[in-house]
Amino acid sequence: MSQQLTVIGTGVIGNGWIARALANGWDVVAFDPNPDAPPRTRAFVENAWAALEKHGLAKDASPTRLRFVDSLEAAVDGADLIQENVPERLDLKRKILAELDAASAPDVLIGSSTSGFKPSDLQQTCTRAPGRVIVAHPFNPVYLLPLVELVGGEATEPEELERAHVLYQALAMRPLVVRREIEGHIADRLMEALWREALHLVNDGVATTEEIDAAVVYGCGLRWSLMGTFLTFHLAGGEQGMRHMLEQFGPALKLPWTKLEAPELTNELIDRVVEGCEHQAAGRSVAELDRRRDDFLVELLGLVEKYWPEAEGLEGRI
């Protein structure tokens, strides 16, 4: 029996969930009050489908298994999983999540794609089954990047996170259960630190946006795509590993190398960042750049999956 994903809100992230679910053979029911949403979503899925075909489709995967409905209540009917993707405003998310909680069967999980809010804050207006409202934070493009951060709130029981883990795995994702709720979860806090430092480098005239991106693309980013931060530094310590690395380079952590507080977003800094990105885009549309990124990610995923823990027989590792 096929499973149904209900998607509320069809911006970039909501449409990414739709494309992923369709590619994995799910039925998708979507609701978005914007009358332009259905054609916009279908164009999005069409643009992503070539990459999804290269990556590999599930049996019976088809864009035709998407349908739009005209109300939130109709959308949740028959749902196995509900994914909320409305704009990142706490008052709006609370309102929509309360409506979803009231309208859906109490055993259906509701995941919020929020990049920053804590689940306990999202659960406050839910009165029927608040524990099933969790953070399920993905990464763009959702239809290719497998990470989803799962975070439970004060009302969430461990069993609900276990159920969520199984459901998102069925969407071919790699769920990461965050041990403690915190603003920004894990990955966005790491990305935010790099982003703030990058803005300082542009603001201080140290580098252009292109040069900063080159530093990541041709250097640390290549290692990070396989090993992440800690294992990369473990290797930097030689045969003695992380302990020697910390003994040797640990004192540098006290040096004023970084500026984690973000710089003032002056008009001059905004112009520098915008002009730098437009120079990098070189006249290519966002849709063109999306396809180029997707082609790259499909090939990269085909490579790195050969080196992920389970490929080495390390089952149960992340």
Image: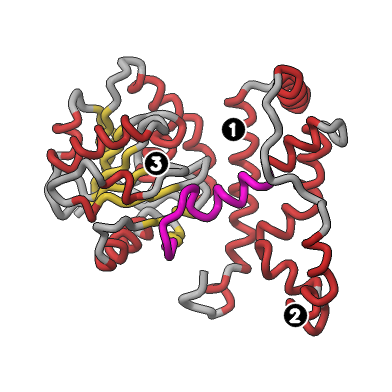
Residue 197 placement (x, y as % from top left): 73, 43
In the rendered structure, does residue 184 fall within the stretch colored magenta? yes
Circles 3, 2 touching at the beta carbon (< 8 Å) = no
Residue 306 placement (x, y as % from top left): 61, 66
Q: Which corner quadrant of the image does residue 223 belong to?
A: bottom right
Alpha carbons under labels 3 and 2: distance apart: 41 Å
Alpha carbons under labels 2 and 1: distance apart: 41 Å
- In this picture, is 37 found above or below 102? above
User: In the drawing, does residue 141 fall left or right of residue 95?
Assistant: right
Residue appearing at x 32%, y 18% in the figure: 34
- Camera-side residue: 65 or 3? 3
Q: Amino acid at mark 2?
A: Arg
Q: Secondary structure at mark 1?
A: helix
Of tags 3 and 2, the one toward the viewer is 2
**Which residue is tagged 2?**
243
Instruction: Identify the mark at residue 120; answer none if there is no mark.
Output: none
**Which residue is tagged 1?**
290
User: In the drawing, does residue 75 fall left or right of residue 66?
Assistant: left
- Camera-side residue: 237 or 302? 237
First-in-chain label (3 vs 2): 3
Magenta range: 177-195
Instruction: Identify the mark at residue 17; answer none if there is no mark.
Output: 3
- Camera-side residue: 218 or 156? 156
How many residues crowd mark 2 within 10 Å: few (<14), some (14–19), many (20+)? some
First-in-chain label (3 vs 1): 3
